[in-house]
Amino acid sequence: MITAGPQCDMEKKEIDAALKSANLTRTSLAEHLGVTPSAVTKMLNSRRPLRQDEVAQVRAFFVKNGITGYADTSIMDVRRVDTPPAIPTRSEMPMDVPILGTAWGGASGDFTMNGETGAFARRPPRYQNRVDIFALYVQGNSMEPRYYSGELIVVEKRRPPQNGDHVVVELLPDRDGTREAYLKVLVARTPTKLKLRQYSPPKEIEIELAKVGQVLRVLTTVDLLGI
C-alpha cells in the first residue's frame, strides 16, 4: 500500500509502468483526475515529488480499474483482481446529510446557498460522525467533464482546501440575503484576490477576497469511499 506524507517519493516512472501493465493510458488517468492529458504529462514529467492527494487519486484510479498489489511504496507490482472493495449498500447509509444549495442556471456554474435544509442526501461511508459536511446540486456546464448539471456534490468545512482542489466559493450575502456560490478549481490565493479556474469554457477568474464568505473543499471519491 502506498504511504505518503505531505510529499511522496513514489517514482513517477512506476505510474507509467503500471499503466502499461494494465493496458491503460495517461488519457484515461486524466479523465479520472478531471484534468487534461497535458496536465497529467506535466505532473509526471516534473521533478517535484507527488503530493499526498495526487498519490491518493492515482491509487484510486488503479483500484477503480481492478488493479491492486501495491508494494510498500511502489505500484510496480500490480495484478488485476475480480473482487471490488466492499462498499455499504444504499440502505446502510443514513439519509441525513443536509442539501443546502438550490441550483440555478447559468454558464458560469453559479448557484445559491440559502442555508435551508429542504432535502437530505445519503451519508458517505467514511463520514458517519461528521457534522461539518453538506451537499449541493451542480447547475450549468462550466465544470464539465468533472461535474455535470444536476450532480450532487458533498462539501466539508474541516479541511482547508489546497491549490488544485475543487472548491465551493461562497460569497457574502447580498442585500436580499442571497449567498451566491461558485464551483471551481482553486488556483491561488493572493492577499487581495482568489484565483479560480473552470473547465468549460477553459478560463481563469478572480474574485475579490473582500467579497468571499468562505472557501470549502469538495470531497473526492477517495474521501467518500476510502479507497
Image (cartoon, rainbow, N blue to C red):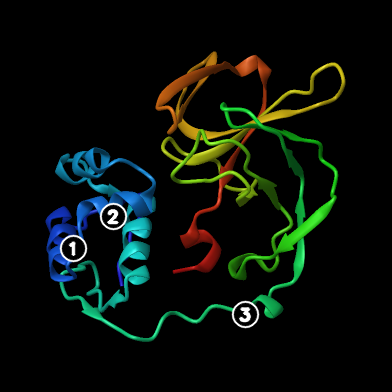
Could you tell which of marks 1 and 2 lies nearer the N-terminus?
1
* Relative side of 40 to 154, left or right: left
Q: CA distance from mark 1 to mark 3?
A: 30 Å
Amino acid carrying label 3: it is Thr
* Relative side of 200 to 32, left or right: right
Q: Residue at x 49, y 60 (%)?
A: 221
| Residue in front for this viewpoint, 205 or 191 | 205
Q: Residue at x 21, y 63 (%)?
A: 24
Where residue 182 sits: x, y (%)? 61, 31
Q: Which mark is residue 19?
A: 1
Are there few (<14), some (14-19), or many (20+) residues within 10 Å of tag 3? few
Amino acid carrying label 2: it is Leu
Asked if the residues shown at circle 1 and circle 2 are in contact, with their CB atoms under 8 angstroms apart, the answer is yes
Residue 52 seen: no
Where residue 16 sits: x, y (%)? 14, 58
Callout 2: helix, strand or loop? helix
Amino acid carrying label 1: it is Leu
Residue hosting label 2: 29
From this view, report whether residue 116 is shown above or below residue 107: below
Asked if the residues shown at circle 3 and circle 2 are in contact, with their CB atoms under 8 angstroms apart, the answer is no
* Relative side of 75 to 17, left or right: right
Q: Residue at x 37, y 64 (%)?
A: 60
Could you tell which of marks 3 and 2 lies nearer the N-terminus?
2
Q: Residue at x 42, y 23 (%)?
A: 203
Are there few (<14), some (14-19), or many (20+) residues within 10 Å of tag 1? some
Quadrant, the N terminus: bottom left
Residue hosting label 3: 89
| Residue in front for this viewpoint, 147 or 212 | 147
